[in-house]
Image (cartoon, helix red, strand yellow):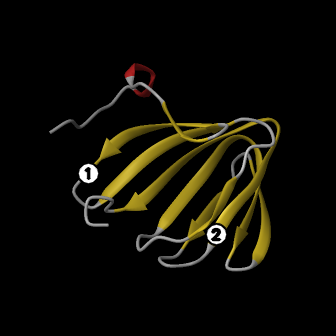
Amino acid sequence: MTYVVKPDEIEAWELHEGSKIKMIMNGQNMTTIISDWAPRSSFPLHSHPHEQMGLCLQGEAVFTIDGEEYVVGKGEVYTIPPNVQHMQLWSVLPRSVRIWCVGDLNRN
């Protein structure tokens, strides 16, 4: 088992147009991901059976979570409960970088 990871050594892959992600740790019950969103990128409305929490490291993004709009900026944390509809409307200039943790992706 790996206990310490160097994110710079992990190759990024495209999640959706304008977004690159690195799955930096995939544990038994939780996954940690770093995502980098280009300006004006978006991700469509969706839900999933696992909880998601994130911390904005850089930039700003606008989320719709359970029908309400939220601006998430540097240093702010967000949470999305299981099965709640959500989407990212866009990343505000210059770009948005976030680290997020989700429940067990291996089970879903």
Q: Residue 107's spot in the image, x, y percent? A: 26, 66
- Residue 48 shown left or right of residue 90 in the figure: left
- Is 40 or 53 nearer to us in this picture? 40
- Image quarter hosting the N terminus: top left
- The quarter of the picture where residue 91 lies is top right
Which residue matches tag 1? 27
Above/below status of 90 relative to 44: above
Foreground of the two, 31 or 57:
31
Q: Is residue 91 left or right of residue 18?
A: right
How far from the left and from the top, in percent, is residue 17?
A: 64, 40
| Residue 79: percent from left, percent from top | 58, 67
Amino acid type of the residue that numbered disc 2 sits on in the rendered structure: His
Frontmost of labels 1 and 2 is 2
Q: Measure the alpha-carbon separation of dots 1 and 2.
A: 24 Å
**Residue drawn at (46%, 44%) of the image:** 33
Position of 80 compared to 69: left or right? left
**Position of residue 20 measured from the top left corner of the image (x, y, whole percent):** 56, 35
Residue placed most toward the observer, 87 or 8 = 87
At x 80% / y 70%, what residue is drawn? 69
* Label 2 sits on residue: 86
Q: Residue at x 64, y 69 (%)?
A: 86
Give the farthest residue toward the top: 9
Which type of secondary structure does the marked residue at label 1 adopt? loop
**SS for dot 2:** strand
Q: Quadrant of the C terminus?
A: bottom left
User: Does residue 95 lie above or below 88 as drawn?
Assistant: above
Mark toward the start of the polypeptide (1 vs 2): 1
Categorize mark 2 by other alpha carbons within 10 Å: few (<14), some (14-19), many (20+). Answer: many
Q: Amino acid at mark 1?
A: Gly
Q: Is residue 18 above or below residue 100?
A: above
Instruction: In the rendered structure, find residue 106 and report the number of the disc placed on it.
Output: none
